[in-house]
Image: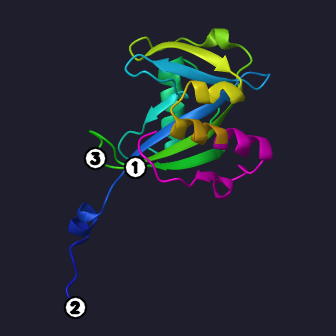
Amino acid sequence: MTFTDEAVWYASLPTAYGTAAALISAPAGEVLLVKPNYRAHWSLPGGILEDGEPPHAGCAREVREELGIDVPVGPLLAVDWVAPEGPRPKPMIAFVFDGGVLADPSAIVLQEAELDEFRFVPPSAVPGYLPPPMALRVAAAVTARGSGAAASYGGAVYVPTVRGAG
């Protein structure tokens, strides 16, 4: 029996990109969305994970960078697999964490190099701001937060549709 060198074997495995975002809401339940200046649609605060960065740490870092605030990164609410599309040759795994309730949005300082604005929108209005796959991910996260299903990683909601970018 021939064994492959461990480093060679690991180098041969498929990889994926990772993203992490925070579901942050106002006291009345509206969802915080941000408008990146480099694409047409809105998004939750968050972004691409750095190499080797744990998703919850990447979520906290991205929120701090984008909004200038530190939020407690709570339970994982949703995980989504996003197929390769266009210039992105690998799939993405998208994590959505509970970013809690933000009672005073005046503390937000937008990262002007990446974001044009932010706003709180009712959960029912989210599909008007996001591409359908991303809207499904946010709806799953809102549902998980409301149901208490996000008590642990094992309680995360997976959006099980196979589709393109989100």
- Across and down, in percent, residue 25 comes to 70, 26
Left or right placement of residue 56 versus residue 10 in this view: right
Q: Marks 1 and 2, Cα distance to the nearest angstrom?
A: 36 Å
Mark drawn on residue 89: 3
**Residue located at (65% from left, 39% from top):** 139
Residue 44's tag is none
Q: Secondary structure at mark 1?
A: loop
Image location of residue 90, percent across then percent down: 32, 49
Amino acid at circle 2? Met
At x 54%, y 35%, the residue is: 21
Q: Is residue 60 above or below residue 91?
A: above
Q: Are marks 1 and 2 in contact (CB under 8 Å)?
A: no
Q: Quadrant of the N terminus?
A: bottom left
Q: Which residue range is magenta in the image?
A: 140-166
Which numbered marker is on residue 83? 1
Frontmost residue, 147 versus 71: 147
52 up-or-down from 124: above or below = below
Q: Quadrant of residue 40?
A: top left
Q: Quadrant of residue 26?
A: top right
Amino acid marked by disc 3: Pro
What is the spatial separation of the Cα atoms under label 3 and label 1, in whole angstroms? 9 Å
Could you tell me which secondary element the residue under label 2 belongs to?
Answer: loop
Q: Amino acid at mark 1?
A: Ala
Q: Which residue is mark 2?
A: 1
Residue found at x 41% / y 41%: 165
Judge left or right: residue 162 versus residue 10.
right
* Front residue of 98 and 3: 98
